[in-house]
Amino acid sequence: MNFLASLAEALPQTPLLTGADCAPWVKDWTGAWTGEPMAVIRPSSTEEVSRIMQLAHAHGVPVVPAGGLSGLVGGTHAPDALVLSVDRMAHIHKIDPVTRVAVAQAGTILHTLREAAAEQGLQFPMTFGAQGSATIGGILSTNAGGSNVLKYGNTRDLCLGIEAVLPDGTVLDLMSALHKDNTGYALKHLLIGAEGTLGIITAATLKLYPTPRIRTTGFLACASLADALTTLNQLQEASSDAVEAFEFMPANYMAAYSDLHPTERAPFEAPYPVNILVELASTAPRDAALSPEGVPILQDTFEASLAALMEDGLVTDAVIASNDTQRAAFWKIRESAAELSLHGPRAAIINDIALPLDEIPTFFDRMAVALPKVDAGATDMTVAHLGDGNIHYTVRPTSPDLKDAIMAMVEAEVRDLGGSFSAEHGVGLSKLNSMARHKPAAALATMQAIKNAIDPTGILNAGKVIPPLES
Amino acid sequence: MNFLASLAEALPQTPLLTGADCAPWVKDWTGAWTGEPMAVIRPSSTEEVSRIMQLAHAHGVPVVPAGGLSGLVGGTHAPDALVLSVDRMAHIHKIDPVTRVAVAQAGTILHTLREAAAEQGLQFPMTFGAQGSATIGGILSTNAGGSNVLKYGNTRDLCLGIEAVLPDGTVLDLMSALHKDNTGYALKHLLIGAEGTLGIITAATLKLYPTPRIRTTGFLACASLADALTTLNQLQEASSDAVEAFEFMPANYMAAYSDLHPTERAPFEAPYPVNILVELASTAPRDAALSPEGVPILQDTFEASLAALMEDGLVTDAVIASNDTQRAAFWKIRESAAELSLHGPRAAIINDIALPLDEIPTFFDRMAVALPKVDAGATDMTVAHLGDGNIHYTVRPTSPDLKDAIMAMVEAEVRDLGGSFSAEHGVGLSKLNSMARHKPAAALATMQAIKNAIDPTGILNAGKVIPPLES
């Protein structure tokens, strides 16, 4: 019996889509990758995932796990493969306010989990633009980042335990709710960020945090990135680590936003080279209490810090949101990044890079010289999780033919500064060449050895993450 | 030429000890493991470690990496093997106050690194009793814990990058100073906690934090562990996550301490079932400022929280350290754990267990019934990093013959409650049987597959961490 017939026979109740029904899985979110899968199967339980993998293993059929399809590197591109979509595995088993953990299936939408936690007065702090489609399995498989990493860490830092199905169908139960567990190799960490090439994450135990009682949000202007980084250190110290977001936007980003939304009031009248969206948060009632002037104490602290920073010349201008509407308006500027960076007249190159914090100013200095040399007419647009050293540096070349030369130039400079060509988006297919160019050979060989050990027939998300090694 | 002759010829400047000179490496810290190594080599650089492993690989000689020799599970037991001691690789390359990272060789003593950071106004927050001998390589290899995990995480959470030498001598350079890096499998996390069975960690890039400007420390008494956990949640919320330590000691611990130190004043006159050492810390000047009553604001917040908790009946008694001498006296009680638990008339069984937070009360309820059934005369002693769910539950059996039965009973209950038999000490040799009994077969098989892939000839710290698998 052929594979699809065996699958239909073994799992008669499980939706198995073919032909036109596979349309949502044909083209990836960025539009860069298109390909018809062999079929799409939508299991509802870990047992079904296990059964599917047993059959795929027996038949040697390639399988590509898929979640919310909002990845940016072609990680779910599945031409002629079976797509295993976890979208029906979306049950939240537990939100526990005492131990502050959530237990959820992999197909749970990030936004849904955040809402469920909020109903119990808790937050799951991972947040980014695609939270309405991204799944828990997807954010774990890509070790997603976002705007709150500065305070709460990447997805792996928010995960206590996982359950995964290995390429041969074995269920690996690492569903611990423990904060400490030193019993052998960190298999959880190996599967997190492996982009579905070592196992299919089917469920997770996640950390929750008390919801902040008070937030204060401002826009700062600095003369330089070096000043901005000193400002971050001083704000963190002054607030005892209450800074949740520290997002950098240069002058051309602010101008592009104003062009697109001419009726919205910009935070600053003047153009500044360095604009920072800062948000502080606290769960403490004392920070939410009002000062004699009627201002929350946290905002008072923020204002006093800013006054000191301005006196020292580190901050040149600042405005604090005086209400929720203004706070939302500030965040809308930051959240327009995809719109501003990607949706233009010419295809853009997304560079999701990470740098050591002290090398960030040098990076931009070098780009100002190097980019025009490769493409005199290219434009660039930056938005950065500055506190994490994570820069989304988007370049719009004058011709698609220059794409490879520009990417190679950017990555070479990044590597020279001790940085990484993929900070939070992962590798997938889009960054395979970058892996080959910049990852140390010993690391690539070790990854391939692990892949061979766990997936010896290579059926799970084949061809992703690890570039073909020269032999 | 035999192996040692080859080694001496290849590395003539590198100290190579044999015979009586190996004495410090013969017996482990707990005294449970004794064995003469073949020799001890003390390289001074990563290049030397690489050369040693190339030769060991070529000759098929087993190698055991060693640091400060303060491990508790026999992880550096090396009968007839070559001990590779990193003690001479103790250079701190960098302490950077702007990016807040340290770069150090693996042999750097934890206490030395902490002092070097302190000189720059920063802290490396990992701290525990053996910090004067434990090395950076050792704490990474065991993913050490300690008293500040609640706030800062385990060692792996404090590590940005590592350098390691693989079993064949290949140098794996993962020395990133990046806060985000999604370029393939998390090899760093795989090597951290692998107890030297996959590679020898030779250097690391570590996170530093600003030193708290103010601390406030108290002893609390609660009627039950459930009340203590609610108290922790409320203190964390009230202080916006300023709780650095939350350490539990039961009545018999407090009594044993008073017996041992009769001239020291106990925090409480009355015996309480649940005694908690709590410490809050803040870097914020506003928390260090004095209230109108001359008390630091952080202490004021702490006192107000305690008053509310006492009114709600969650805390039954409390005392706050009024000066540094009293704070030191409080910590001395906690830091006497090894003395109180280990140095008694009969050999003690150290159970380093982790539990889901809400199962901790149940665990002690069960022990009160189950322990006397196995050994009616056994005594127990507990000290716990309660906020992490990490319990050091030490049992002193009436006869060493009962050791295995007691350990098996404790571990079975722990497993039944979703816990772990090794929270922070690791596996080494001492917990191999526990691994065989309690770790899922799929996890053990995956670990063995990874071990085989990275160390195919099995020369690196052979026989540790993974129990022999039934075939």
Image (cartoon, coloured by chain):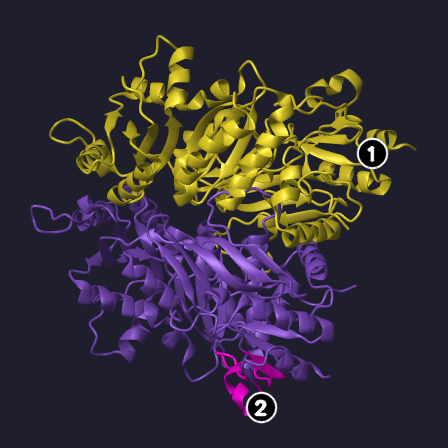
Chain colours: A yellow, B purple
State the residue in front, A404 or A285.
A404
- At label 1, counting other C-alpha atoms closer than 10 Å, the crowd grade (few under 14, some 14-19, many 20 or more) is some
State the residue in front, A207 or B345.
A207
Is B116 left, or right, of B18 in this rendering?
left
Instruction: Residue A387 in the image: state x and y as whole percent.
Output: 39, 39
Is residue A425 depicted above or below B383 in this figure?
A: above
Determine which quarter of the picture holds residue B405.
Answer: bottom right
Q: Is residue B29 magenta?
A: yes
Look at the image and give the residue range highlighted in magenta. Answer: B17-41
Label for residue B19?
2
Is residue B41 depicted above or below A211 in this figure?
A: below
Quadrant, the N terminus of chain A:
top right
Circle 2 — which element? Answer: helix
Circle 1 — which element? Answer: helix
Determine which quarter of the picture holds residue A363.
Answer: top left
State the residue in front, B260 or B200.
B200
Amino acid of disc 2? Gly
Is residue A277 depicted above or below A205 in this figure?
A: above
Going 54% across and 91% down the picture, which residue do you hit? Answer: B20
Label for residue A10?
1
Q: Is residue A323 magenta?
A: no
State the residue in front, A283 or A346.
A346
Q: Write down the chain letter for disc 2.
A: B
